Amino acid sequence: MKSYARIVDNVVVELFSTEGNMAEMFHPDLVWVDITEIAPAPQIDWTANFGTLGWVFASPEAPAPVSPLKTLANKWLAGIRAQA
């Protein structure tokens, strides 16, 4: 069974697995990319770009966690601003 990702505006919007012929199953305007051999497997909301090396997928960047030290510093600075 093969796995496919549907791409819209350089983003994975749908995943589909089948043993059928994708050209016979869907409208030809839909962009389906075979991701069977790609590891890690792309997921919904991953970016997808086509270049000279073929399709390249990337996971969305997770926001950096806010460190406790940064939280304390922001509270301290807010207190100083409130006193001024």
Image: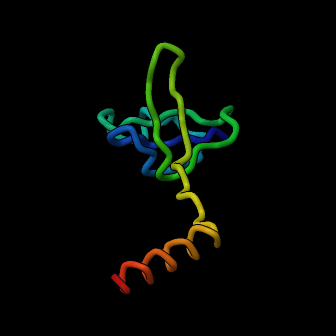
Residue placed at 55% from the left, 72% from the top? 73
Residue 23 in the figure: left or right of residue 67: left
Quadrant of residue 58 within the rendered picture = top right
Residue placed at 44% from the left, 24% from the top? 50
Q: Relative to the observer, which residue lies in front, 64 or 28?
A: 64
The colour scheme is: rainbow
Return the residue found at the far front.
84
Q: Relative to the observer, which residue lies in front, 73 or 4?
A: 73
Position of residue 39 relative to residue 68, above or below, is above
Residue 50 in the figure: left or right of residue 39: left
- Residue 80 in percent (x, y) is at 43, 80
Residue placed at 68% from the left, 32% from the top? 37
Q: Quadrant of the N terminus?
A: top right
- Residue 23 in percent (x, y) is at 42, 32
Residue placed at 38% from the left, 35% from the top? 31
Quadrant of residue 65 within the rendered picture = bottom right
Quadrant of residue 41 within the rendered picture = top right
Q: Relative to the observer, which residue lies in front, 36 or 72?
A: 72
Return the residue found at the far left.
29
Position of residue 29 relative to residue 74, above or below, is above
- Residue 42 in percent (x, y) is at 58, 44
Number of marks: 0
Position of residue 83 relative to residue 62, above or below, is below
- Residue 27 in percent (x, y) is at 32, 39
Return the residue found at the far bottom.
83
Q: Quadrant of the C terminus?
A: bottom left
